[in-house]
Amino acid sequence: MDNLMSQAVDLMIAGMGFVFAFLVVLVFATMFMSKIITRLTPPEPATPARTSRAPSSAPASVDPDTAEAIKKAVAQFRARHKK
């Protein structure tokens, strides 16, 4: 029974050592790939480029009743979500 327990402990230590070694290799491989990618890609611009807005497909004029309903809905939303 003692021999079986000794083998089990040896197997457990070997397995844990293998997993630890694999994780260490994985961390270094990830760091190495990150350094390669940062060297190969161009730096991002400091400010994002402005894009022009697409023309709206909405009609130029809005019905006064619709405009009033929108105004009330926005006011109600803002009243409920005040910080």
Image (cartoon, rainbow, N blue to C red):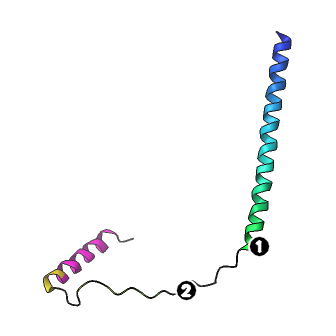
| Residue under label 2 | 49
At horizontal 86% and vertical 13% (from top left) the residue drawn is 3
Pick whichever of labels 1 and 2 is earlier in the sequence: 1
Q: Who is closer to the viewer here, 46 or 39?
A: 39
- Say above or below: 5 vs 19: above
Is 78 within the magenta? yes
Q: Element type at marker 1?
A: helix
State the image coordinates of residue 80 (x, y, percent, origin top left): 30, 68
At horizontal 81% and vertical 26% (from top left) the residue drawn is 11
Mark number, residue 23: none
Residue 61 relative to residue 37: left or right: left
Which image quarter is the C terminus in? bottom left
State the image coordinates of residue 14 (x, y, percent, origin top left): 83, 31
Q: Who is closer to the viewer here, 57 or 75?
A: 57
> What's drawn in magenta, residue-wise?
67-83
Q: Who is closer to the viewer here, 36 or 16?
A: 36
What separation in Å lies between label 1 and label 2 (alpha carbons)? 23 Å
Dominant SS in magenta: helix
Q: At label 2, which amino acid type do we have?
A: Ala
At horizontal 74% and vertical 73% (from top left) the residue drawn is 40
At horizontal 25% and vertical 73% (from top left) the residue drawn is 76
State the image coordinates of residue 70 (x, y, percent, origin top left): 22, 78
Mark 1 Cα within 10 Å, few/some/many (few <14, many 20+)?
few
Q: Element type at marker 2?
A: loop
